[in-house]
Amino acid sequence: MLFLKSTAVMKAPGIYEVDVAAKPPGKTFGVYLATDPDNPPQAVLAELAELGFKGSYQKNYTHRDGGRVLDLHFEKDGTDIFKGWKTEECSANLAAIDSLFGKLGISVTTRVMTMAEAYA
C-alpha cells in the first residue's frame, strides 16, 4: 500500500511511513503503516486498537535498500451501509487519527485511492 522511499529515516520511533486512505467514494478510511519489525510502535498500535481499529493485513518484507519493514493495515467498521462511516463518524475518526499521529509529530493527510489502487 505504501510507497516507502527509504528505511534510513523514521517519522517516529518504529514508524517509517503513515498513510490514511479510503477506497472510493472516500468516506471510510484505513490506516496503513510501514513499521520497523524489530522495534514496532507498540503504544501507537495499542492506541489504534483503543480507537476501534482492527488489523486487517500484515506482511514482512525487505526494502530495496536492505531495511526490513512490517507493512500493517487497520480498518474500523462504521454504522452506515456495508459497515461504512457516517459523516459524523468520519469526522470523529479522522480527528482521533490526527490527534494520535500529531502527538508523534507526524502530519497526516487523508486521500482517496484510485480505483486501480483500491482493488488491486
Image (cartoon, helix red, strand yellow):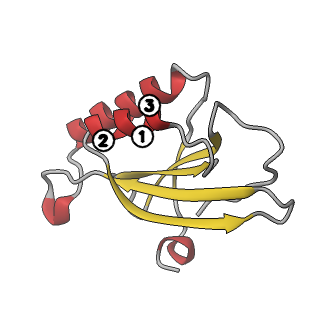
Give the residue at mark 1. 45
Tell me whether circle 1 and circle 2 mark residues in contact (CB < 8 Å): yes
Question: Can you give x and y, in whole percent of width and height, for residue 28 in the image?
Answer: 33, 53
Q: Which residue is mark 2?
A: 49
Q: Is residue 77 above or below residue 106?
A: below
Q: Are marks 3 and 2 in contact (CB under 8 Å)?
A: no
Q: CA distance from mark 1 to mark 3?
A: 5 Å
The image quadrant where one finds the N terminus is: bottom right
Circles 1 and 3: CB distance less than 8 Å? yes
Q: Determine which quarter of the picture holds residue 84.
A: bottom left
Image position of 111 (left or right of 83): right
Q: Residues within 10 Å of mark 2 (few under 14, many from 20)?
A: some
Decide which of tag 3 and tag 2 comes sooner along the chain: 3
In the image, residue 98 lies at what x, y percent? 46, 29
Q: Residue at x 15, y 55 (%)?
A: 80
Secondary structure found at label 3: helix
What's the residue type where badge 3 is placed?
Answer: Ala
The circle drawn on residue 43 is 3
Farthest residue in the front direction?
A: 38
Farthest residue, direction right: 65
Residue 97 is drawn in which quadrant?
top left
